[in-house]
Structures are given as C-alpha cells and as structure tokens.
Image (tube, rainbow, N blue to C red):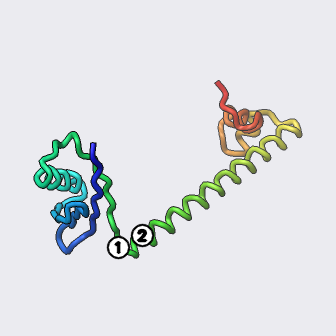
Amino acid sequence: MTTYRVDVERGKKFWLVYIPVLDRWTQARKVTEIGEMAQDLIELMTETRAQDIDLDVHIKLPDEVQERLARAKELREQAAQAQGKAAEELRGAARKLHDIGLSMREIGELLGVSYQRAHQLVSGGRQVA
C-alpha cells in the first residue's frame, strides 16, 4: 500500500486537488468527491490499483475559518471543564442535603432531578444498576 499526500484548497467554483509527488492537479465539485478524484488521478498516472492506494488528505481552509474553529475548540474545552465543575458542585449539594437528613425524593425535587439521579449524586455519581 502506498500513501499519497493530497493537498486541497477551495478555488472559485471547485475544490482544487493537488498530488505533490505527481505534481498533478485535479478538481472536485464537492468535498465528498475529493478522495475519489485524487484516487482516479493517482491510478491514471501510476497505473496503481485502487486497493493499493492510501490517501493522506490535507484540506486548507480559509484563515478566518481556521481561527473560528480554533476558538470553537477552545470554548468547547472550557465548557467541558465548567460542566465538570458544575457536576462536582451538584454532587456536593446533594451530599449536604443528604447529610442534613433529606430523603432522596426530597433531594431530587429540590435539585430538579429524579430520585434515582439524586441517589447517584449522593453516592458519588456512580451509576446505579
């Protein structure tokens, strides 16, 4: 199996598909056609069978898109951390309510969760069978 790097960028109407090792270009109308078009070009130029071709596709997106995607990733990571902290606080609240003698049903009612979920929170968040 031979791996071919495929560099892709958006042209005015089409995706421009470049195979550096062959120094050849092709184009695709849709993202879903990129692999097929690259593979067809490689097969044609090298007489290699499709099953012997592996593609390493690199799509270059516009700078603004890359910046927005990086920011979205950063925000998702922050949200995951905040969600973890919120879950920790909810467990702490459930345990405190349990320590002062409230039933699981009461805890669930006060926290807006089912009594089964209240039990999970009090017992450390472990799943109850």
Q: Nearer the viewer, residue 40 or 63?
A: 40
Q: Position of residue 4 (x, y in %)?
A: 27, 54
Is the C terminus in the top left, top right, bottom left or bottom right quadrant?
Answer: top right
- Residue neighbourhood size for the residue with mark 2, other residues' Cα within 10 Å, grouped as few (<14), some (14–19), many (≥20): few
The reply to whether callout 1 and callout 2 are in contact (CB within 8 Å) is yes
Residue type pointed to by label 1: Pro
At a point 22% along the width and 56% down the height, the residue shown is 34
Q: Secondary structure at mark 2?
A: helix
Residue type pointed to by label 2: Gln
Q: Is 43 rendered above or below residue 16?
A: above
Q: Position of residue 46 (x, y in %)?
A: 14, 51
At a point 69% along the width and 48% down the height, the residue shown is 87
At a point 64% along the width and 53% down the height, the residue shown is 83
Q: Which residue is mark 2?
A: 66
List the single residue furthest toward the top. Answer: 129
Q: Which residue is mark 1?
A: 62
Is the N terminus in the top left, top right, bottom left or bottom right quadrant?
Answer: top left
